[in-house]
Image (cartoon, rainbow, N blue to C red):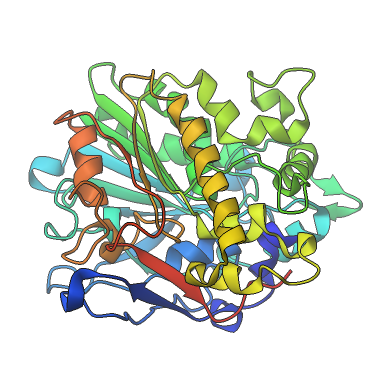
Amino acid sequence: MASPTSSASAPASHHLRLWWRRRGRGGAVGATFTVALLAAALLLALSLYASSLPRAPTTPSSSSNLVGLTLVRRAKEKGAVCLDGSAPGYHLQRGSGTGSQNWLLHLEGGGWCRNLRSCASRQKSVLGSSQYMERQIEFAGILSNDKFQNPDFYNWNKVKIRYCDGASFSGNVKNELQNGTKFFFRGQRIWEAVMSELLLKGLRHAKQAFLTGCSAGGLATFIHCDNFRTLLPKDSRVKCLADGGFFLDVEDISGQRTMRAFYNDVVRLQDLRGRFPHCGPNMDLGQCFFPSEVVKDIITPVFVLNPAYDAWQVQHVLSPVASDPQHSWLECRLDISKCDSNQLEILQGFRKKLHDTISELKHKKDWGFFIDSCFIHCQSLNSLTWHSPSSLRVNNKTIAEAVGDWFFDRREVKEIDCEYPCNPTCHNLVFAKPFKA
């Protein structure tokens, strides 16, 4: 697979070693945190970022927060299957007390596959087959049941929906045979089947509901947000959050639109053009898949959580290996503190493009955003970055506090951080080596 998903070829620990640098705070916080990689669970680049963050210290109530896998019933009968034809799955943790009638759903991320070869590789991984999925996973960050780590949503019904279709839960190709081999491009049916099952398990009675997703799951959140709203009672509070899912349609350092070309292949392979009403006849296929286009039709309130220097996008959208034959960006891609003045100027231009695009959402009164200046990717699934004494802060608010304020209408939240390296509370990722191309 090309660079946007190339890290599927080996377990996480074989690809990189991440550690954290904490700048500033004069010793109030330790300078380095240990990384806890999830064994070989998430094999693609996007998923790696989300799962490779250090973990905050746990309390007794959160130390055994393991949640079992549920496979969708009669999945094959519904045609709602993973790339390899196996049943999709989700992890459900029941709420309690005041949260028993509230629901938080999280769509897992993990890149995309652009051709049959890359999809065949995913068929033999957690991102293409439930046969490889862990039977239990830990819920942390926005999924935590610890009130101190997740103050607003800790006692809600919480669901993590596993990702195994390769196109952000959006494909619906009837034909199973592709060049004589079976591939199931059924992400839309997976979405529908999981929603049907959860509705019967109590989601249909939700007083409040929150659809969230990270990375490719963040893109899926944009795609399905309005449909999610239609499934629930009209008098319920329903909102969505996309974490690290605002991928930009920009030229890379060589002047090529690498990510658009990649999305062109994904949209063509899974026949997605008709899926997006905003997609005009004069647009490239790949343009339809970018959040900047998808959001134009969304009515339901959405919160956009994104770093201005998204580590995954810097490596795969802005400076992909193929566009850097002289390896002049190698150190910068590994560690933002090693970028030279010219590279930092390009990174500031990337940040400006994100800000300009996000600014177009300011007229959406009920929307919110939190754009920090860290070199990271996906921040809602880890308790250290979500809400802890050492968490990132913008205007003295953690991400969890900002999201909670917005969701419950406590205040308007449209936070935009200053330029790197201004924020001493950032946890910036540092890579031992880049992802393989």
Residue 52 to residue 175: above or below: below
Is 199 in front, or is 33? Answer: 33
Q: Is residue 74 at all visible to an observer of this figure?
A: no
Q: Residue at x 22, y 29 (%)?
A: 412
Q: Quadrant of residue 374?
A: bottom left
Is 431 in front, or is 128? Answer: 431
Is 223 in front, or is 127? Answer: 223
Residue 147 shown left or right of residue 205 in the figure: left
| Most distant residue in the right direction | 179
Q: Position of residue 155 (x, y in %)?
A: 16, 50
Q: Residue at x 56, y 31 (%)?
A: 292
**Where, quadrant-wise, is the C terminus in this rendering?**
bottom right
Q: Position of residue 411 (x, y in %)?
A: 17, 30
Q: Position of residue 61 (x, y in %)?
A: 13, 68
Q: Residue at x 78, y 47 (%)?
A: 256
Residue 398 shown left or right of residue 303 in the figure: left
Q: Is residue 25 at all visible to an observer of this figure?
A: yes
**Where, quadrant-wise, is the N terminus in this rendering?**
bottom right
